[in-house]
Each structure stands twice: as structure tokens, then as C-alpha cells.
Image (cartoon, rainbow, N blue to C red):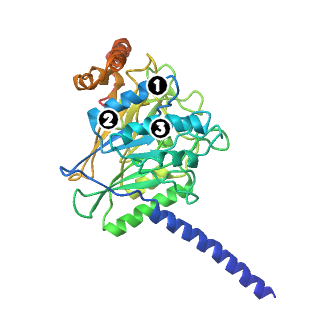
């Protein structure tokens, strides 16, 4: 009887292990979006749109600015990295998503989506319901990973050669969660890290080499503070570390820096090894996040650029010099590198090509307003930066 019981236990454990391995194998092989290709000239352009926070008071202006940006930039893919339309009901969220997605759909621009901390925080609807809204549009290339992984919307978008079947590049998309059980911001979970590691290794085996890649998610990784320098409260352009009182950080000369810190970075409190796994694998060039609305900066740390992009929304008269979008350019002939630039609404509104694209009085009035108020914002910021750099000899703003 005892041996029979032991056999039953072994069979049960084997079934559990088999089910787990089968599920993970399923996740590894199926969470891959439809392949995309580099253009005939070897180029591929990504427009990073994040934290639009679409509501009644900004949706018309925000979507119009995004439409103008699409017409000017003509990206091959838009990456939406969360906090897009966090309304109180699914119906109102659907309406806001429709206003945005119709902009992409009408221009035949593919869109890949991941979620932010606000996208389902009020429990009125789930991430899966919101993903279904996005995927009801033909331009969406996003994947709902179902029960395979924590969260909703962790997958990889492969980029193939302009001709032929050679895989050239990967775009990893992660759901970085909303909040942990203690109320901190969340982070990418252990099973998502394990999936990335296994899939990355599998891709290397399948192709006989590492395939370089970029990562997109909402919440920045905790390692950003390891790449900054701790200073005291009185140091200009230093910011108190989230969750750690009386610890202030600024750019460090030890690392390569990009852009400028305008607020403290907001990673999760805990860490499940995502960044370390990517350092170990050696196939990630950069991680792009949103979440911190006025931060457009990057730091190269352990071979990976940790990069934050601006909130892509219209916010009345405020922050026209600190809201905008990011462009990322890839080349088929140099898959181990990328270039990026930040476009702020203030500079965007001054662009003669954008002025030419403006369609009617409302557009021209919107751009004029951004230029007018942005001039004062930019003048004040430039004065503060010049003053600090001139009198301290410390660089607080680097080229984007």
C-alpha cells in the first residue's frame, strides 16, 4: 500500500512538473509577434509613445499632436508603453483608446502595447480586457500572453532582414506590473525573467549567434540608482531616491549619460533579476521606459543603456519643453547599435515641416500656444542649467 501511495505521489508530481514545463515551452514558443522587416534601405524607425493619460481635457490635443508627429516621422512601428487611457470605466477607456488607435490605423502604422501601473489599477476592468480593445484594431501587433506569464503583454517582436529569412533584431516587450503587495511600484516578475532567459538562449541556438535587441516596458529597473551618484540634499539637480528618505542622487561622471534628470526615477522596490539576466545574456543594447513623465535621460550601465522617455501628451500650458516623444532608429547593416533622439513639443511646434502639416485654425492655434508658453519654460530651464554648470563645473544636461 505504501509503495502504491508513493507511486501515486510521484505520478502526481511528474504531472505537475510536466504541466509546468509544457506551459513554459508553450510560452517560450508562442509569445512571438508576427515578424516585421527592415525596409529596403535597411532602416527601421520606432516612435516611443508613453504616458499619454488621455482624458476629456487633453485627448483631442494629444491625439492631434501624435498624428502630426506620425505624419512628420513616418515610423515603422509605434511602441506604447503604458498609462495610455486610464479612465474609470471600461467604456470610457475604450472610447479614449479608439481615438488614439484610429490615428495609427488610418496611417497603417503597426503598434505594440505594454501596460503601466495606472492601466488597470482601479479594478473596474482587467489588463486582459484592455488588451482585447487594442487587439481589435488591425494595426496592433500586441500579444495577450494569457496564463503563461505574470501580467498581460509580455512578448517579443522579431525584425527580419529586408529580404530573406534571416532574423536580424528583437524587440522585447514586458508588462512591468502595477504595485506589489506592500504598495510599492511593481517590477518584472521571476517567471517573466525566466521566460526571457530561456527564449533568448533558444533564439541564439536557432540562429547560431546572439540576436541584439531593445527592451520596452513601463517601469524603469532598480539598477538606475546604481548608475547614479549619491549626494546630499543641497546638490543642485539631485533628487531624493524613491522609498529611501534623505538619500539624494544625481548623474555620475563614472558612466556615460544622456539628457537630463527632471525628477527622481521611480523603479519598483524589489528586484527579480531582470537587469542582471540581460547583462548576463549580452543581447540587450538598451531598455526604454516611461512612467517618469518629465525625465528624458539615459545612463549606460554594465553595457546596457537604461533610458527613460517623456510623457507623450498635451498638458495644457505646462511642460511643453518636457513632454514629447522619442525616436529610435535601427539599421539592418549594424544590428549591434541604435540611435535615438528626443523630440519635445516645444521644438516640435517650431519645426517648419510641422507647421506645414498643420491642418486648419485649431492646429495652428495649438502649435502657437505651445511655442509661446514653451519659450518661457525653456528660457527658465536653460538659465538654471547654465548657472549650475558655470558655477559648479558639473554637467547636469547632456546631449539627448
Task: Give the residue drawn at x 27%, y 52%.
Answer: 336
Residue 20: which numbered mark, if any?
Answer: none
Which of the two marks, 1 or 3, is nearer to us in this view? Answer: 3
Query: Does the CB distance between marks 2 and 3 fall below 8 Å?
Result: no
Task: Give the residue drawn at x 31%, y 37%.
Answer: 327
> Residue 160's x, y, as percent?
29, 58
> Residue 126's x, y, as percent?
61, 45
How many numbered circles are shown? 3
Of 127 and 9, the residue lying toward us: 127
Q: Secondary structure at mark 2?
A: helix
Residue assigned mark 2: 70
Q: CA distance from mark 1 to mark 3?
A: 40 Å
Residue 98: which numbered mark, if any?
Answer: 3
Q: CA distance from mark 2 to mark 3?
A: 17 Å
Q: Is residue 36 above or below residue 320?
A: below
- Which quarter of the image is occupied by the C terminus? top left
Asked if residue 50 can be seen in this view, the reply is no
Q: Mark 1 or 3 closer to N-term?
A: 3
Rendered image quadrant of residue 87: top right
Q: Residues within 10 Å of mark 2 (few under 14, many from 20)?
A: some
Q: Mark 2 or 3 closer to N-term?
A: 2
Residue found farthest to the left: 41
Q: Is residue 334 above or below residue 258?
A: below
Task: Give the residue drawn at x 37%, y 32%.
Answer: 325
Q: Secondary structure at mark 3?
A: helix
Q: CA distance from mark 1 to mark 2?
A: 35 Å
Of 385 and 12, the residue lying toward us: 12
Task: Give the residue drawn at x 59%, y 40%.
Answer: 120
Which of the two marks, 2 or 3, is nearer to us in this view? Answer: 3
Query: Does the CB distance between marks 1 and 2 fall below 8 Å?
Result: no
Amino acid at each position: 500500500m505504501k509503495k502504491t501511495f508513493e507511486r501515486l505521489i510521484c505520478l502526481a508530481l511528474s504531472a505537475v512538473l510536466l504541466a509546468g514545463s509544457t506551459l513554459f515551452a508553450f510560452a517560450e514558443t508562442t509569445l512571438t509577434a508576427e515578424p516585421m522587416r527592415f525596409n529596403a534601405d535597411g532602416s527601421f524607425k520606432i516612435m516611443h509613445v508613453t504616458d499619454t493619460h488621455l482624458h476629456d481635457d487633453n485627448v483631442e490635443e494629444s491625439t492631434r499632436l501624435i498624428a502630426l508627429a506620425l505624419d512628420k516621422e513616418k515610423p515603422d512601428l509605434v511602441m506604447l508603453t503604458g498609462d495610455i487611457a486610464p479612465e474609470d470605466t471600461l467604456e470610457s477607456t475604450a472610447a479614449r483608446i479608439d481615438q488614439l488607435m484610429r490615428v495609427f490605423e488610418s496611417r497603417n502604422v503597426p503598434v505594440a502595447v505594454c501596460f503601466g501601473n495606472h492601466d488597470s489599477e482601479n479594478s473596474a476592468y482587467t489588463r486582459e480586457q484592455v488588451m482585447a480593445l487594442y487587439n481589435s484594431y488591425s494595426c496592433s501587433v500586441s500579444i495577450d500572453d494569457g496564463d503563461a506569464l505574470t501580467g498581460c503583454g509580455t512578448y517579443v517582436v522579431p525584425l527580419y532582414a529586408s529580404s530573406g529569412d534571416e532574423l536580424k533584431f528583437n524587440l522585447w516587450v514586458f508588462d512591468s506590473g502595477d504595485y506589489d503587495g506592500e504598495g510599492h511600484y511593481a517590477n518584472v516578475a521571476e517567471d517573466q525573467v525566466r521566460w526571457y532567459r530561456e527564449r533568448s538562449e533558444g533564439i541564439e541556438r536557432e540562429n547560431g549567434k546572439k540576436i541584439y535587441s531593445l527592451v520596452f516596458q513601463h517601469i524603469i529597473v532598480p539598477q538606475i540608482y546604481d548608475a547614479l551618484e549619491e549626494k546630499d540634499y543641497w546638490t543642485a539637480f539631485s533628487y531624493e531616491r524613491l522609498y529611501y528618505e534623505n538619500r539624494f542622487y544625481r548623474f555620475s561622471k563614472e558612466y556615460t549619460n544622456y539628457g537630463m534628470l527632471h525628477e527622481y526615477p521611480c523603479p519598483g522596490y524589489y528586484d527579480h533579476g531582470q537587469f542582471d539576466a540581460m547583462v548576463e545574456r549580452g543581447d540587450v543594447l538598451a531598455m526604454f521606459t516611461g512612467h517618469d513623465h518629465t525625465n528624458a535621460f539615459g545612463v549606460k550601465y554594465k553595457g546596457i543603456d537604461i533610458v527613460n522617455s517623456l510623457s507623450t501628451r498635451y498638458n495644457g500650458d505646462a511642460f511643453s519643453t518636457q513632454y514629447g516623444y522619442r525616436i529610435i532608429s535601427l539599421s539592418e547593416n549594424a544590428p549591434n547599435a541604435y540611435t535615438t533622439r528626443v523630440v519635445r513639443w516645444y521644438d516640435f511646434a517650431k519645426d517648419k515641416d510641422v507647421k506645414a502639416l498643420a491642418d486648419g485654425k485649431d492646429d495652428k492655434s495649438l502649435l502657437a500656444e505651445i511655442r509661446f508658453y514653451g519659450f518661457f519654460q525653456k528660457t527658465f530651464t536653460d538659465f538654471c542649467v547654465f548657472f549650475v554648470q558655470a558655477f559648479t563645473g558639473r554637467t547636469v544636461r547632456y546631449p539627448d
